[in-house]
Image (tube, helix red, strand yellow):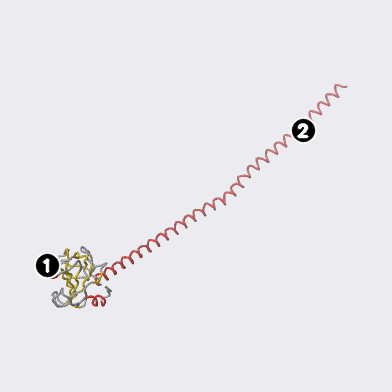
Amino acid sequence: MRKISTMKNRTLKSVTGGRVAVVTGGLVAAIALGSTAAMAAAPAHHEGATAPVASSAVQAVQKQAADQKAAAVKKAADAKAAAEAKKANEAKKAAEAKARVNGWVTPTTHYVLGAGYAQAGPHWIHKHSGQDFVVPSGSTVRAAHTGTVVTAGWGGAYGNNIVIKHGSHLYTQYGHLSKIEVHLGEKVTTGEEIGKSGSTGNSTGPHLHFEVRTTPYYGSSVEPLHFLKVHGVNA
């Protein structure tokens, strides 16, 4: 009788154990299935998170394109401004060059005024026919105005001298030169170097004798400093 009872008990325990195992297995399976379902659902959530990233990338590309366009526009504007500035500068230089060609200057620089026009003295048969600019020998002598050289050589009392024709009834003369740097018929422009100062001819020391004339010859001179002043030059 005890054996039978024992067998029943064992049978009940087996059945109960089996049920527990089944239940436990079911729970494990359920947990596993839940995990799988969660994992399956996860990609959908991940894909949703990708959208803002993609949007940021598009915005970055758009910003880069906008920046490049703005840079190109600025570069073009800068190039246009530079071209206009260059054109204006060239026009200014051309105008200044034209003004120099058409203008007048003193026949030398860094000078002290010496004997003046119509001054009397023992050094001249008549009154002084020009204006002396006292400068060291070898100083630059320049054309007072644009014109054509009509005399370039020895001039007696004037020593080495140059006469330039500037138009009808208008000439300038440069005397006592140590060196002549132009030739007969040469075209010269305002301020161009034509020779070097000296003390040749009837001279008591280094200086430049300057005359303004109505002809290329002695005896037709006019007051040179007044003439220069009328033409915008204060000597």
Q: Is residue 128 above or below residue 39?
A: below
Q: Is residue 35 above or below residue 162?
A: above
Q: Are marks 2 and 1 in contact (CB under 8 Å)?
A: no
Residue at 60% x, 46% y: name it. 46
Q: SS class of the residue under badge 1?
A: strand
- The foreground one among 84 and 93 is 93
Q: Residue furthest front?
A: 122
Q: Which quadrant is home to the N terminus?
A: top right
Q: Is residue 206 above or below residue 23?
A: below
Q: Which mark is residue 20?
A: 2
Residue 50 lies, in percent from the top left, at 57, 49
Amino acid bearing label 2: Val
Residue at 40% x, 59% y: name it. 75
Q: Would you say 33 lies left or right of 84 here?
A: right
Q: Is residue 84 above or below residue 28?
A: below
Q: Quadrant of residue 115?
A: bottom left
Residue 20 lies, in percent from the top left, at 77, 33
Q: Would you say 148 lies left or right of 30 here?
A: left
Q: CA distance from mark 2 to mark 1?
A: 142 Å
Residue 99 lies, in percent from the top left, at 27, 71
Can residue 169 be seen here?
no
Can residue 24 be seen here?
yes
Q: Would you say 76 lies left or right of 106 here?
A: right
Q: Which mark is residue 154?
A: 1
Q: Residues within 10 Å of mark 1 (few under 14, many from 20)?
A: some
Amino acid bearing label 1: Trp
Q: Which mark is residue 200?
A: none
Residue 112 lies, in percent from the top left, at 25, 70
Q: Residues within 10 Å of mark 2 (few under 14, many from 20)?
A: few
State which tag comes first along the sequence, 2 or 1.
Answer: 2
Q: Nearer the viewer, mark 2 or mark 1?
A: 1
